[in-house]
Image (tube, rainbow, N blue to C red):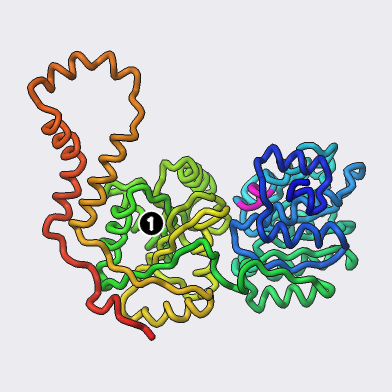
Amino acid sequence: MTKFEALGLQKSLLDAVADLGFETPSEVQEKAIPILLESETDLVALAQTGTGKTAAFGFPLIQKIDSNSRTTQGLILSPTRELCLQITKEMQAYSKYERNINVVAIYGGASITDQARQIKRGAQIIVATPGRMKDMISRRLVDISKIDYCILDEADEMLNMGFMEDIKDILSGTPNDKSTWLFSATMPKEVSIIAKKFMNSPQEITVGAKNSGASTVQHEYYVVGGRDRYPALKRLADTNPDIFSVIFCRTKRDTQKVAENLIEDGYNAGALHGDLSQNQRDLVMNSFRKRQIQMLVATDVAARGIDVDDITHVINYQLPDEIETYTHRSGRTGRAGKSGISMVIITRSEQRKIKAIENKINQKFIAKQIPTGMEICEIQLYHLANKIKDTKINADVENYLPAINDVLQGIDREELIKKIVSVEFTRFSNYYNKSKDLNSSDSGRDRD
């Protein structure tokens, strides 16, 4: 018996699990799936982003749906268009061996008539953003009066984004005897209000400590002078040549400015904030997913719904006002069992905030030094050597070798290596030659 079989999943779902390459259930899946399959219950599940929550509610929902009825039986509410589309895609993959199960995504920025047409054809499961869902209910384009299951995914994010009233209005139009499953990374008081008002004696599961950060994330902080934030950011990027990161700023203006500066300085960067059109946003996200953008500079609101598993670093260019927001930021890395690093760039006056975050996330920060120019040159030199060593030879190069050999004639092996490495290395050497120490004088000071 496989570990997923032991959770009580039917064969059609186990076949989908096998196709997806899942081998071992995550902790939230192991805890939630048996509870949701065995009883009709309300559930509050506290778990970080990237811990496999969609499968934790998706598999039980699909197993409980009556595919012979075209009535809408399950409603999943999620904060953003991106997350809505991501959940829909995953639900469709989970239900690939089910007959007649239709999963429809409802979100703003797309044709409301097209979405209404899809629902009319029969959608047992609707995945929706609260704003568009409320709009469709008020226009009587969707009927959720007979649903059996309502899932609130990333509940704290939805309420952070100001959807409290929309969610209350939507839930008020659903049956009292439905099951409500609430999934959230943190449990602020607004989420507790929703749980109390719309749930009946919910069972509770917690993956990790309440409001804690993911255990796969290492937290680091760097203390610099106020004017040295941007040079410090560049050094952190140069110290990690294979960085694939999200950089958080507090305002749209700072986000745009930092991204423009990075692009100007030769980095593969892009900006994600509320002033972008949906089309611009899609282009940036597609480039990021394809790794054409290595450093995505984003506001907290714009970054909600980013669902990319391989992010190596989260860099807090500025700390957020709310500690819960830091938990969400750092949760963008260290996902799907991989490790990640959350870096914070602060000034001396902000050091006390680190202690407050530590207490909230139940994890310690490591005080680190911004690398010196020479340390970065050394790292880049070894990275270049490894890159050359691991590069696959392009067969087309063979055609040009005789001419290249003529050009390079008379240069011995050692001299040639020096010249090849110098092509790239000189750029860093020139930039960091005589560069100053960016660390604030007491950056390593004991805060206790």
**Mark 1 = which residue?**
256
Which range is magenta?
83-87
Foreground of the two, 307 or 11: 11
Depicted 74 relative to depicted 227: above or below = above
Residue at image position (56%, 51%) is: 307
Q: Is residue 85 magenta?
A: yes
Q: Is residue 180 left or right of residue 262?
A: right
Foreground: 128 or 348?
Answer: 348
Residue 75 placement (x, y as % from top left) = 78, 55
Q: 10 Å neighbourhood of mark 1: few (<14), some, or many (≥20)?
A: some
| Corner quadrant of residue 26 | bottom right
Q: Position of residue 144 (x, y in %)?
A: 84, 56
Q: Residue furthest left?
A: 410
Percent across and percent down for residue 175 are 88, 64
At x 64% / y 48%, what residue is drawn?
86
Q: Which structural element holds mark 1? A: helix
Q: Quadrant of residue 443?
A: bottom left
Q: Provide residue 236's location: percent of width, then percent of height.
A: 31, 58
Secondary structure, magenta segment, majority class: helix
| Kind of residue at badge 1 | Gln
> What residue sits 68% from the left and 69% below the top?
206
Q: How many marks?
A: 1
